[in-house]
Image (cartoon, coloured by chain):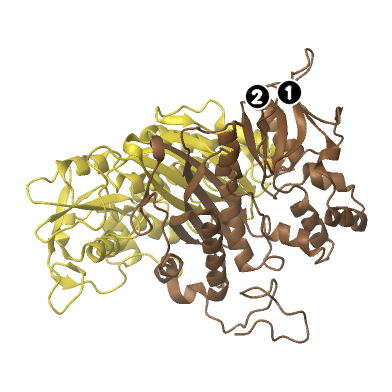
Chain colours: A yellow, B brown
Amino acid sequence: MNHTATSGRTPWPYPGPRPGEVEPAAQQTIADIGEFELIDLITRGLPSNDQVELGPGDDAAIIHSRGGRTLCSVDVLVEGVHFRRDWSSARDIGRKSVAVNVADIEAMGARPIGIVMGFSAPGELSLTWVRYFVQGVREECDRAGVSLIGGDITKSRDITVSVTILGDTGPEGPVLRSGARPGDLVALKGRVGWAAAGLAALSKGFRTPKAVVEAQQVPQPPYGAGQEAARAGATAMIDVSDGLLGDLGHVAQRSQVSIDVHRAALGMPEPIRSVGQATGVDPYVFLLTGGEDHALAATFPPGVVPEGWTVIGTVGEVPTAGWPSVTVDGRPWEGKQGYDHFH
Amino acid sequence: MNHTATSGRTPWPYPGPRPGEVEPAAQQTIADIGEFELIDLITRGLPSNDQVELGPGDDAAIIHSRGGRTLCSVDVLVEGVHFRRDWSSARDIGRKSVAVNVADIEAMGARPIGIVMGFSAPGELSLTWVRYFVQGVREECDRAGVSLIGGDITKSRDITVSVTILGDTGPEGPVLRSGARPGDLVALKGRVGWAAAGLAALSKGFRTPKAVVEAQQVPQPPYGAGQEAARAGATAMIDVSDGLLGDLGHVAQRSQVSIDVHRAALGMPEPIRSVGQATGVDPYVFLLTGGEDHALAATFPPGVVPEGWTVIGTVGEVPTAGWPSVTVDGRPWEGKQGYDHFH
């Protein structure tokens, strides 16, 4: 089936259907092949990380953790909440579901090993969609060096992808949110504001700027940067998933410190400025409060910030009559600091 | 609020609303309190297994595994597919979501340590429902000796609970599906057919027999029996979640053996016989193909079957011109062997 053959539109450069492409009604669905063939389709010929002792096919998977310590985190992506099938291709959604989880393990300064995936979908979902979704999952697993080690498949009304990731740490141990100390520098690796600007553009019916729309479709966490930060001596670290200020707020709270962000240090990427103009939103709202890019924010003692990280702020004492907080250029930020699922 | 005060019905003996109870419209919802208060409600004062190094609150949780080997399994429960709010109380659904996962770790002959939970729900879900759900989760965690170590909360149309469980094994190592040998005995611990009979009763509008309805609402896997079987020398083991014949079929396939089940050894519990009569279904269909009770089925060399396990069959060679299969009293079973989510 040639997905680029419909009329004179721009050719669709990716494998898989164009987002929102109407699929032939006669196409095979997952109900046609059933749960066990579907499992086979997903798991057939999976490559395996060398710390995986047992992959899919038994009651549980088994991994080996260096030092006997296993890290674990879960993220759930729900259709209509975290993605829309008319905004993202199946492959993008597969990639994103892996990337957001790897970011959590990176943020502990740890090494990701394997994922288990809960996949829920309506029976009438096309097999083609699932094939490209699985392709995306595998591609991103390859990029991040993790294996798909198990899962569960169920029926549901909306596509829901729940990924749990396991990882371990080397001798440098995990980097928690609680270790930031007054005098530390705050540094960032990866992008902030791009995915939020992309969402704002898509919500207004735009498909451009392409760079921010693609950032919304598939985040690009800086793989390997978390372990790099741990080796360099990071004192605290967090995955920026809900917005820079909100997530630094978690670090401030856990570490009982104050954090000041220097706005000028963030720069202002052109596509974000342009979405701000087109939508009437202060572009710093994207930079400071936009989630879903999965950059890493970490605190370091001065002098050890690794190359490639941008120093964006400083850590200070909590004021005597105050509480742990995050300021921007010394002043409180007016407005929301991040994303709340129910607010 | 007194949930038993409505008219002259039987008093509702459990904490929490009666299944299907209409809740006051003015009641507080999870959207009223927001994601972060909801996380606090779920995680506040959680007890912790002594192998948990870091619980909820950072980017990932950390457990310690004896021997450096971590087992991992996921199960997803979807409203309208795995449970109905008018058939099961919030507390029952909380308990079930833990129990079905512990069963997978038991089936590896392993010890469960902790769970991470993806919880998706509509914003208008009542806080009371969530409170009782969390109570059920905590109760079952206590029964099984596991800790809630992390999670993710998102919006969705249908309540979806995705639980991933981590565990480890002692020196006896994991018991896989692949180790059954001709000459072994097949033994069962726990119940089969009860939950399926309960579902059949509920589907016809009955609320009795109480024993099978309750079995459908909350499975009772035989906690500890998996480790017991491993120590006794079980050669293969499986969690009976999809139906006895279907799940033994997985063992036969993986072990490249044939399995014969002796129907008389299963007995016929009175409530299952009675549901069979009321619904016109051969009650052996429930016993042999009903899932969701989460019994353990294991194979043992003769002479080592632990007390409390019931020998229900034998393991034989695959016939020369045949393939691995499961028979009942020497004959193929006519009909479905278990549950397929899309068939």
As measured in the structure, the alpha-carbon distance from the residue carrying label 2 to the one carrying label 1 is: 8 Å
Q: Is residue A31 in sight in this rendering?
A: yes
Q: Position of residue B342 (x, y in %)?
A: 71, 44
Residue B83 located left or right of residue B58: right
Using a 10 Å C-alpha cutoff, classify the residue at mark 2 as few (fewer than 14 neighbours), some (14 to 19) or many (20 or more): some
Q: Nearer the viewer, residue A4 or A243?
A: A243
Q: In which quarter of the image is residue B205?
A: bottom right
- Kind of residue sitting beneath label 1: Pro
- Residue occupied by mark 1: B324
SS at circle 1: loop
Using a 10 Å C-alpha cutoff, classify the residue at mark 1 as few (fewer than 14 neighbours), some (14 to 19) or many (20 or more): some
Rendered residue at 59%/34% (across/down): B232
Marker disc for residue B255: 2
Q: Position of residue B332 (x, y in %)?
A: 85, 29
The chain to which mark 2 is attached is B
A152 in relation to B128, above or below: above
A33 in relation to A280, above or below: above
Q: Do the residues labelled 2 and 1 touch (CB within 8 Å)?
A: yes
Marker disc for residue B16: none
Q: Where is residue B201 in the image (x, y as percent from the top left)?
A: 82, 60
The chain to which mark 1 is attached is B
Q: Is residue A83 in sight in this rendering?
A: no
SS at circle 2: helix
Report the quarter where the C terminus of chain A lies: bottom left
Q: How many badges with numbers are in the image?
A: 2
Residue B190 located left or right of residue B270: left
Q: Which mark sits nearer the N-terminus, 2 or 1? A: 2
Residue A247 located left or right of residue B161: left
- Kind of residue sitting beneath label 2: Ser
Rendered residue at 77%/57% (across/down): B199
Report the quarter where the N terminus of chain A lies: top right
User: Looking at this rendering, what residue extends furthest in the left direction?
Assistant: A303
